[in-house]
Image (spheres, rainbow, N blue to C red):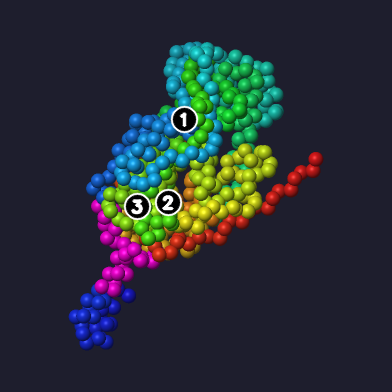
């Protein structure tokens, strides 16, 4: 029933028309513009106006993104740059007047890693500069090494090892199938339209257990291949770039960050176009010689990882929490712009907006900037275990060494005092694209609340709530212990096609208008979660998997 219909109905039964009309107007305005005593589904449109004014007119989101990407650069967990990013974000949040700003250690993580340069040149049959980047946690070459190239299509077990045993000493191994590159028949830039959002809103159940099994399998294979190549005394290994073309390629880890694990040999990723040239030369029985020089360093003085934490204190419900977060760490090929300086800058800007606009949340709003996300949600998982809930440490060594997200969910949860205090957590980690809605993560009770919060944001393109669950980022650490953790739906832009984990994940790929919009949306969600009368509804606690029986001796 709208305001006009209500007023006309009251006018027929009440002779004091003017008084009733005024009372009706006041009551309806209180239902729409809610104060501190509002219910979860009510809106504070006065605060929304303040948030939008501050976010659109005085945004600092791109300044933060510039500082993280251009000034600091890549932020591999455990590296000096990651620690510089912790300090930069701590200072910035404190300068904005937020409270309880600090770095919180977790771990031990292991050894850090960085590289100063990598050069790969073809010397025979032609002189040519190649584009290549070393994989994280692999050693340098200790000077320039000149060696002949040996081509291997695959190393997937003992049969392949046996075929190449005794043939690789002093050689540079080119390993893996060369991707076939084709002209692009689809645009690199992708945004949601009405049809794609409608499709996304339709629920699809997804079983993520197969992803865990595949990850475990690939980790074991990587370790055995690295050990084989080290034992065979190869000079270095070069693999073709994947995830792009035109000189763009993905770069992640090749070695281990765990203290005490073998260092292995230098591993590099090469631009697909350059790898393909060498591949074709060898296929035509042409001798290829390369000169490789990689300068890489391990950092073992501080094995801990760090999360940056800050708060905007609440009022009458200040002991309860609403949290925002994004991961601060990145891979090292680019400068970690869309993955995930974009998310960090947006959630930091959301906190700045809330502080500068003068709104008064009832619950304390806390921001957490995680590290260790790229290695398996390590920073957020450690935070959950310290503050909210944890499961017993697995007894089997192989299971115990896995990141928490990959472990079997066995054993009961032990709850910390903070478990009952957290209302909801909101995460941003899908690139630079503007927010178009939110994943309800299978929480049916969340859907009508989110749809209500979307009402003053629809003109910004935020229209969709889906019951679907999404994985692979830090809200999963909350969801895994039964806490309401959510990830926003974003326009993909060039995330998959160009920047995700690639050497071109740089500031130029960021879209300022999208990030300004994202910060405003996040601030609006956080504020409404913080003024609700009730805590955010929760799903049933996740049921632990049955303990696997021990195999007989």
The percent coordinates of residue 93 (x first, y second) are 34, 42
- Marks 1 and 3 close (CB-CB < 8 Å): no
52 up-or-down from 85: above or below: below
- Crowd rating for badge 3 (residues with CA inside 10 Å; few <14, some 14–19, many 20+): many
Confirm whether the magenta stretch covers residue 539.
no
The percent coordinates of residue 402 (x first, y second) are 61, 40
Q: Residue at x 27, y 87 (%)?
A: 13
Look at mark 3 in the image and give the residue it sits on: 523
- Residues at marks 2 and 3, CA–CA distance in whole angstroms: 11 Å
Q: Residue furthest left?
A: 18
Q: Residue at x 54, y 35 (%)?
A: 109
Q: Is residue 280 or residue 337 the one in the foreground?
A: 337
- Marks 2 and 3 close (CB-CB < 8 Å): no
Which secondary structure, mark 1? loop
- Crowd rating for badge 1 (residues with CA inside 10 Å; few <14, some 14–19, many 20+): many
Q: Residue at x 58, y 31 (%)?
A: 258
Magenta-drawn segment: 26-53
Which secondary structure, mark 3? helix
19 up-or-down from 128: above or below: below
Badge number at residue 323: 2
Q: Is residue 481 or residue 106 the one in the foreground?
A: 106
512 up-or-down from 12: above or below: above
- Residues at marks 2 and 1, CA–CA distance in whole angstroms: 26 Å
Residue 145 visible somewhere in the drawing? yes
Look at mark 1 in the image and give the residue it sits on: 79
Which secondary structure, mark 2? strand
- Crowd rating for badge 2 (residues with CA inside 10 Å; few <14, some 14–19, many 20+): many
């Amino acid at each position: 029933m709208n305001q006009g219909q209500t007023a006309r109905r009251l006018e027929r039964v009440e002779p004091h028309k003017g008084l009733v009309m005024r009372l009706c107007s006041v009551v309806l305005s209180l239902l729409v513009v809610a104060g501190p005593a509002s219910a979860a589904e009510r809106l504070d449109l006065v605060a929304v106006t303040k948030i939008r004014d501050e976010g659109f007119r005085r945004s600092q989101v791109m300044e933060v993104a510039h500082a993280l990407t251009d000034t600091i650069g890549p932020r591999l967990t455990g590296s000096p740059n990651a620690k510089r990013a912790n300090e930069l974000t701590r200072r910035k949040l404190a300068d904005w007047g937020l409270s309880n700003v600090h770095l919180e250690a977790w771990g031990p993580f292991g050894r850090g890693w960085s590289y100063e340069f990598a050069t790969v040149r073809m010397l025979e049959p032609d002189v040519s500069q190649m584009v290549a980047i070393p994989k994280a946690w692999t050693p340098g070459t200790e000077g320039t090494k000149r060696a002949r190239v040996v081509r291997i299509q695959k190393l997937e077990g003992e049969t392949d090892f046996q075929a190449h045993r005794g043939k690789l000493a002093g050689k540079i191994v080119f390993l893996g199938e060369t991707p076939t590159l084709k002209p692009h028949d689809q645009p690199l830039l992708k945004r949601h339209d009405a049809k794609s959002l409608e499709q996304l809103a339709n629920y699809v159940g997804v079983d993520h257990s197969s992803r865990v099994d595949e990850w475990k399998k690939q980790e074991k294979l990587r370790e055995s291949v690295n050990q084989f190549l080290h034992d065979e005394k190869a000079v270095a290994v070069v693999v073709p770039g994947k995830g792009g073309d035109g000189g763009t390629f993905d770069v992640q880890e090749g070695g281990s960050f765990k203290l005490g694990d073998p260092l292995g040999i230098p591993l590099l990723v090469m631009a697909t176009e350059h790898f393909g040239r060498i591949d074709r030369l060898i296929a035509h029985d042409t001798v290829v010689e390369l000169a490789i020089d990689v300068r890489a360093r391990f950092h073992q003085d501080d094995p801990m990882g760090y999360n940056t934490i800050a708060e905007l204190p609440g009022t009458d419900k200040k002991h309860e929490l609403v949290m925002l977060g994004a991961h601060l760490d990145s891979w090292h090929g680019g400068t970690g712009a869309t993955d995930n300086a974009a998310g960090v800058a947006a959630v930091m800007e959301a906190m700045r907006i809330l502080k500068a606009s003068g709104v008064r949340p009832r619950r304390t709003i806390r921001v957490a900037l995680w590290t260790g996300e790229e290695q398996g949600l390590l920073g957020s998982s450690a935070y959950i275990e310290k503050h909210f809930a944890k499961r017993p440490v697995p007894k089997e060594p192989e299971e115990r060494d896995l990141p928490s997200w990959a472990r079997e969910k066995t054993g009961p949860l032990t709850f910390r005092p903070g478990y009952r205090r957290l209302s909801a957590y909101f995460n941003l980690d899908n690139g630079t694209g503007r927010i178009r809605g939110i994943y309800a993560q299978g929480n049916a009770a969340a859907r009508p609340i989110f749809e209500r919060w979307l009402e003053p944001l629809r003109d910004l393109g935020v229209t969709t709530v889906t019951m679907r669950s999404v994985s692979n980022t830090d809200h999963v650490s909350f969801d895994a212990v039964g806490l309401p953790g959510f990830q926003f739906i974003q326009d993909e832009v060039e995330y998959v096609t160009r920047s995700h984990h690639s050497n071109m994940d740089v500031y130029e790929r960021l879209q300022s208008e999208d990030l300004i919009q994202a910060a405003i949306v996040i601030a609006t969600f956080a504020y409404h979660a913080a003024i609700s009368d009730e805590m955010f509804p929760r799903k049933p606690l996740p049921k632990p998997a049955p303990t696997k029986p021990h195999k007989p001796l």
